Image (cartoon, coloured by chain):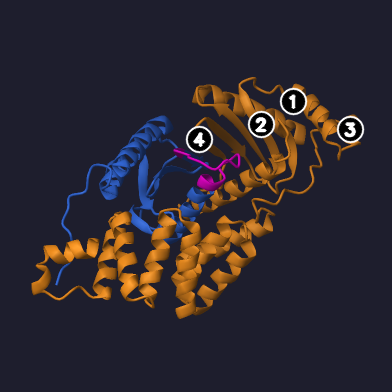
Chain colours: A blue, B orange
Amino acid sequence: MSIAVATRPALGRDLRASLAELVKLEHITGGLVVAPDGLVIAADLPRGIDAEPLSALAATLGRELELRGPRLRRGTFPMAQFASVSGIVFLGSTPVGFIVLLGEPQADTDAVRTALRAAVGTVYRAWAR
Amino acid sequence: MLVARIWHMLGGGRRRRPTSAQIFRQAQRLRDQGRFEDAAELVTEALMHEPGSVVGHLLAGSLHMILRETGQARTSFERVLALEPTQPRALLGLARISLEEGDAGTCRDLLSRALARYPDFPEARALLELTRDLARNGSTSSAAPAASAAATLVPPVAAAPAVAAPAMTRADALAADRLRLPPESRETLFMRTDATLLFAEPRGPRTEAVAASAVKLARIATAVLARAGFGPLRHAVIEGAAETTYLRMDDAAILTLAFDRDVTAATAVSHLERMWGRCRSELA
């Protein structure tokens, strides 16, 4: 017996589709959507990168930003980027979790942040309905 | 209600009501699809019929975490452990909550218990490595201030009464003048990577806790970068509701500058790099 309820996700509710669009950006090598408890909702990562440990740590980072932020202020952090010499991690915060993108050092950070901001906004609007 | 709706759609009276196991499986599917409110509704209803379900309480804990209901999540995970003391996901859930609350010791104990029972548990292993790194670097508790500010940037003449807040403020003012702080900056912090505060403008009662928080954040970000196959954190940009914080660091020190959202990224980064050069020269 199946008890599935067939529905088509509204725009912004289909997090896999949102991620699929974001990883098409130039110099973005992969990404994932992770719930605040570390559960992987969607992942498209380069070979050799394990989703589980990355999602566990990304959720920890997202929650730390949510709870304290860089200035110990609880509240929203729409977006953050963390760069090393060899790559960049972008993190977007949504009501259902965090969108994480992995980028090469030459990624256009302004363009990626603009796209991520748009995706985060779409998810917010979908969840506010 | 959702169970009744699903049952009704399936023909209600002609078919048997779904079992709790079926409902939990459906709730899990809904959670995996990101339909958290629907999943939570199903789990709550099913737990009323089967209050001793480990799967049900585990799902409830996960959903409470997702919905940022930390207290309820803790209760759910504790119920799981009362039923199954080594349940790894419940141990991980409680460990996460402990880490969020700055209790790294409890976090480590819980993760160690999970790994003792299930050594192949990559999430727990990653978090345990992180908590060990935080402990090594003195940023285990975001509430605990860093070591006393042996302010390297404070000139000797002002450093003598270092415990007196007004003297520190004067010292900071002198350092601010020497470092030529950008006028747009709302807050500047310069600290060692062990969270020893070297300079702050403005300085208040929570400044050292803020510095400790920034160090902890940098450590977690470095762990994320490492898991993504990248090197240690060097730059960060964190957008908040009202302001954006820019961070620059190396193996020895961290500088953060906070600007209003209307300051352009190019201006902020340019200030950050100039300040970073001056701060590192002073430290050297």
The subunit carrying tag 3 is B
Q: In this orientation, which residue lies closer to the viewer: B88 or B62?
A: B62
Give how far apart the Cα atoms at labels 1 and 2 are: 9 Å
Comes first in the chain, label 4 or label 3: 3
Q: In this orientation, which residue lies closer to the viewer: B22 or B263?
A: B22
Q: Is residue B191 left or right of residue A44?
A: right
Mark 1 touches mark 2? (CB < 8 Å): yes
Residue drawn at x 33%, y 56% is A41
The kind of residue on which mark 1 rests is Ala
Q: Check chain identity for marks 4 and 1: say if they share one.
A: yes
Comes first in the chain, label 2 or label 4: 2
The kind of residue on which mark 2 rests is Thr
Bounds of the magenta span? A65-79
The subunit carrying tag 4 is B
Residue drawn at x 39%, y 60% is B63
Q: Check chain identity for marks 1 and 3: say if they share one.
A: yes
Comes first in the chain, label 4 or label 1: 1
Residue B164, placed above or below residue A58? above
Comes first in the chain, label 3 or label 2: 3
Mark 4 touches mark 3? (CB < 8 Å): no
Comes first in the chain, label 1 or label 3: 3
